[in-house]
Amino acid sequence: MEIESKVVAPHTFNSRLATIRQYFVWEIDVYLSTLPSNDSQYDSIQESRKRIIAWIEKGFINSPKSGGISRKALTEDEARFLVNCLNPESSDSFAFYEPVKYRNFVAVSLMLNCGLRPGELLSLRVEDINIGAISSVTIQRRPPDPNDERRPRPSVKRSGRVLPLEGSHFLRMLDKYIVEMRERLESKSGKSSDYLILSDEGNPLSHSSLTQLFTRLRSAYPDYLPEILTPKALRHTFSTRMEKALRAAGFEEDRRKQALAMLRGDSSLESQTVYIAQEIEDRARQALSDYQKKLTMGKDR
């Protein structure tokens, strides 16, 4: 009887292990919440919690670095982990203050799902979000806002566009952020604001604060999130995913370039070439992997 060996990629293994860790932490925290702080079990369970987390974290493995074209986008596992670790409904989600959790989730999801530049994200007003039968986000160029005290002042420098928003969970989180959580942030500031993404203090979020968010995420999850994690990496991830989706939908190369340029708000078609080249390399690597597997299977018989 021949036993087939199944091997998963390091990032897949790490993602699954992270889910296990999250489950154990959630179970322990739920139980701890039922105990008074002076209960004799409380301290010992807290110590056990730390040991379990330490044991699990020793099991994570490093991913091999790929050659060829310099990697600019997140893998599917990395993108999935990023969204999961920011999920405000998760007991083990990043950050502590609930409105900030929702803010982080909304900001990162808009960049990952729509390919927004940092300036475009930080320029969004609440009125640019439409949640309904057909939900959408509008990226539009506006005259400089004299009341915007951020330096540098975010702006939309490229083509405006209207992009659809999908996903019941994301739309529910977005709606709750706008209706409830954003107001809680705004109440901490002495000024009202129309901007969608607010800082912890209730002011329009700055470029430096957005950059710092990604630095903190990389530091908090070094085994799961790569050093390339930046706002630009999310835009590359969006573009790479869209290239694959357009190819799967039967778009020819010229039409894929046009579609990517429209979705990304670019005026140049040539700037889309890198994503087509990346897709070609990925397909070539997969073909080589399949070819080698067939050769190996033939020798093992």
Image (cartoon, helix red, strand yellow):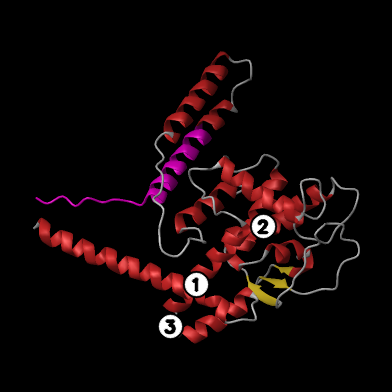
Is 89 displayed left or right of 49 in the figure? Answer: right
Residue 166's mark? Answer: none
Q: In the rendered structure, which disc, 2 or 1, sits on the residue that comes first in sequence? A: 2
Q: Is residue 8 visible?
A: yes
Residue at x 82% of width, y 73% of height: 142
Q: How far apart are labels 3 and 1 at the CA level? A: 16 Å
Residue named by callout 1: 275
Q: How far apart are labels 3 and 2 at the CA level? A: 31 Å
Report the magenta residues as a range.
1-27
Kind of residue at disc 1: Tyr
Q: In the rendered structure, which disc, 3 or 2, sits on the residue that comes first in sequence? A: 2
Kind of residue at disc 2: Ala
- Residue 92 location in percent, x, y? 57, 40
Which callout, 3 or 1, points to the residue nearer the camera?
1
Element under disc 3: loop
- Residue 108 location in percent, x, y? 63, 57
Q: Main secondary structure of the magenta part?
A: helix
Quarter of the image where one finds residue 249: bottom left
Is 125 displayed left or right of 89 in the figure? Answer: right
Quadrant of the frame with the C terminus: bottom left
Kind of residue at disc 3: Gly
Check whether the beta carbons of the residues at disc 3 and disc 1 lie within 8 A of each other.
no
- Residue 68 location in percent, x, y? 41, 64
Residue 23 lies in the magenta-colored region = yes
Quarter of the image where one finds residue 52: top left
Q: Is residue 44 above or below residue 254?
A: above
For disc 1, the neighbor class at 10 Å (few under 14, some 14 to 19, many from 20) is many
Residue 250's mark? Answer: 3
Judged from this view, the residue extending furthest toward the top is 40
Which callout, 2 or 1, points to the residue nearer the camera?
1
